[in-house]
Amino acid sequence: MEGFDPRFRDFPDYILGITREIWEERGIATLHHYYARDIVVRSPASVVVGNANVIGATMATLSEFPDRQLLGEDVIWSGSPEAGMLSSHRIVSTATHAGDGVYGQATGRTLTYRILADCHAKANTIDDEWIIRDQGAIVRQLGHEPRAYAEAQIAAEGGRETAKRPFTPAIDRQGPYTGAGNDDPTGARYAAVLSAIMAADMAEIPKAYDRACRLELPGGATGYGWGAADRFWMGLRAAFPDATFRIHHQIGRQDAAMPPRAALRWSLDGHHTGWGAFGAPTGAPVHVMAISHAEFGPRGLRNEWVVFDETAIWKQILLGTPG
């Protein structure tokens, strides 16, 4: 871990440790040295530049969810300390909606939801990030549907003409990280599975997935078996049948005491022209930013986690539909 604080024994320990320090130990000021001054942070809702903006957003979140915990399930990573490392960090977050904020007046409800975040780090500093929260799970637990939440967002932002546009590649900012991951065969295996599914080869599911697979899906949903995998992927692909599927980052790892596992950051770019997971076709242009993790067992893909932001997709559909 050349260039990193020696108290961290390896890169996963660094990612897990600073996350706990920032959020749960209230070391928000440490973002001044853990995050680069001009860091680029992308989420499905926006692009934020600079650690000052990250600090402000962190304090606002903790004001709304003061007991929030971020429980790191896994860190799938690539690179080296000298060249820079990319972590794909899978988190389960628990929190109580105890303060007023972006989700409205405090409800007192307790939430559990997942986050997947890809972070580039070098010399003890994170300088590039892609983060996706399961907003569908958050808003449902607060008593809203993702479409209704997106409609309320648009209204609160002044209507269709002035509402903030969700992330698309057109508004992206180039950060210091330009890598694409590693060439581990587990990453390539998972990339091949998703590429086949996105090419409408749903017969790939019983070939590649364990019959007893477990799926953790957007909206806080859990599914089991080939049928659940088929319904999820078919519903997404059917909604955007002309969309181009791209894998932007691919990691595979085979570590001691862990199953072979992979992390992919990927996107769909196209139009809402089909019946599927997002209702009646509208023709609206849509960009889906997604990250997914997979673990493989002796009979194929055993566990899969997929995160994208349903509210950001609905917002694009609503803003892109003639009014």
Image: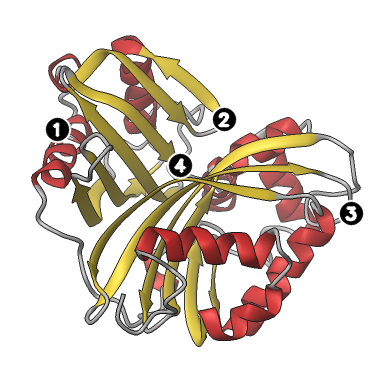
Is residue 318 among what the camera can see? Answer: yes
Residue in front for this viewpoint, 77 or 214: 77
Look at mark 2 in the image and give the residue it sits on. 220
- Helix, strand, or loop for circle 4? strand
Look at mark 4 in the image and give the residue it sits on. 307
| Precedes in sequence: disc 4 or disc 2 | 2
Question: Residue 231 appears at what percent x and percent y?
Answer: 37, 17
Look at mark 1 in the image and give the residue it sits on. 196
Q: Quadrant of the N terminus?
A: bottom left
- Helix, strand, or loop for circle 1? helix
Q: Amino acid at mark 3?
A: Asp
Disc number for residue 207: none
**Looking at the image, is mark 1 or mark 4 nearer the viewer?**
4
Residue in front for this viewpoint, 241 or 217: 217
Q: Give the CA distance from mark 1 to mark 2.
A: 25 Å
**Looking at the image, is mark 1 or mark 2 nearer the viewer?**
2
| Precedes in sequence: disc 1 or disc 3 | 3
Q: Residue at x 29, y 47 (%)?
A: 263
Q: Give the CA distance from mark 1 to mark 3.
A: 44 Å
Q: Amino acid at mark 1?
A: Ala
Crowd class of label 4 (few under 14; some 14 to 19; many from 20; radius 10 Å): many
